[in-house]
Image (tube, grey):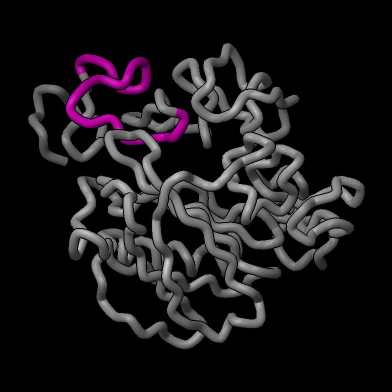
Amino acid sequence: MQHRFSSGPLALAVALTALASCKSATDVAPSGAFVLKVSLAPGAQMPDELRASIYDDTGALWSGARFPASGPLAPESASELGTILIQPGSVSGDLRIDLRGLAGGALVDEATLKIPHASFSGGTFDLALSVPVPPDTDGDGVPDPIDDCPTIADPQQTGCPVDAGASDGTTGRHDAAVDRPSTHDAAVDTATKHDAAVDVPRGNKGNGAGCGGANECSSGFCKDGVCCNNACDQPCQSCSTGMCNSVKSGEDIPECAAPMTCNGKGKCVSAAGGSGG
């Protein structure tokens, strides 16, 4: 997971960790927070994990946050999956949410949501995973309904050029990370505040497509021979499907190879140490 070092994303990190199991603790959002009530639309497949990506006008706050943090999803019922609490703190512009349902590491259903800045006093929002998944015209891993610039690939959502003709009403908006007042550390507020792989020349291959280098992928990441939604460079992480997932009960070469192995929790441990950790 990637985050920028400011008060908003750090507050969000606490909330995501607190309800990572996606169990319903409450349907009432605390002041300044949001509760997402996650369900399945008719015909949607039950996922075994959820992945959340959250954006504001400055870029990606979270990319591919997993629910639960480890192990399979434990839904409340056949159609109700549970609730997720979001406490974003300081946010620039609308909050844009992409929630994906994965089964066996493959995308099976998806839902998107925009929370207008005017609604930031808090509230409860319904989010139903459905098929088919929403379109992604530019192949950057951000669905068109919440993409700040649907015609130009930018997985970090750093702003739409004034002449890009975005279809979501953002035409004419400059990069918020450049235009906003400099209130944080200079390393955070520059255009290079995201992973360095974003700055390499990008190709037009979408996530899951075969690649020989990061410059072939619209995301700017090439891992395990396919274009990936993020760097996915930690031990016991694989991106064979185009989405970064945990490797469990086996080797992750070269990051976690014998005499080490990935245990059932996706942790790189000594093979002689059993499945603990």
The C terminus sits in image quarter: top left
Q: Looking at this view, is 78 or 56 the one in front?
A: 78
**At 40% from the left edge and 46% from the top edge, which residue is drawn?**
109
Q: Looking at this view, is 60 or 82 the one in front?
A: 82
Extent of the magenta region: 242-259
| Count of marks placed on residues | 0
Is 20 left or right of 166, judged from the image as shown?
A: left
Query: Percent position (x, y) of residue 194?
Result: 65, 44
**At 54% from the left edge and 57% from the top edge, which residue is drawn?**
54
**At 72% from the left edge and 33% from the top edge, which residue is drawn?**
199
Is 205 left or right of 122, judged from the image as shown?
A: right
Query: Percent position (x, y) of residue 122?
Result: 51, 83
Which SS does the magenta portion mostly show? loop
Of all residues, the one furthest to the right in this rendering is 163
Q: Is residue 232 above or below residue 88?
A: above
Q: Quadrant of residue 259?
A: top left
Q: Looking at this view, is 120 or 62 the one in front?
A: 120
Of all residues, the one furthest to the top in this rendering is 212
**Magenta stretch contains residue 178:** no
Query: Percent position (x, y) of residue 265?
Result: 20, 40
Q: Quadrant of residue 26?
A: bottom left
Query: Percent position (x, y) of residue 77?
Result: 18, 63
Q: Is residue 217 above or below residue 145?
A: above
Q: Is residue 217 above or below residue 149?
A: above
**Magenta stretch contains residue 248:** yes
Is 62 left or right of 71, judged from the image as shown?
A: right
Q: Is residue 182 above or below residue 205?
A: below
Is 242 left or right of 252, judged from the image as shown?
A: right
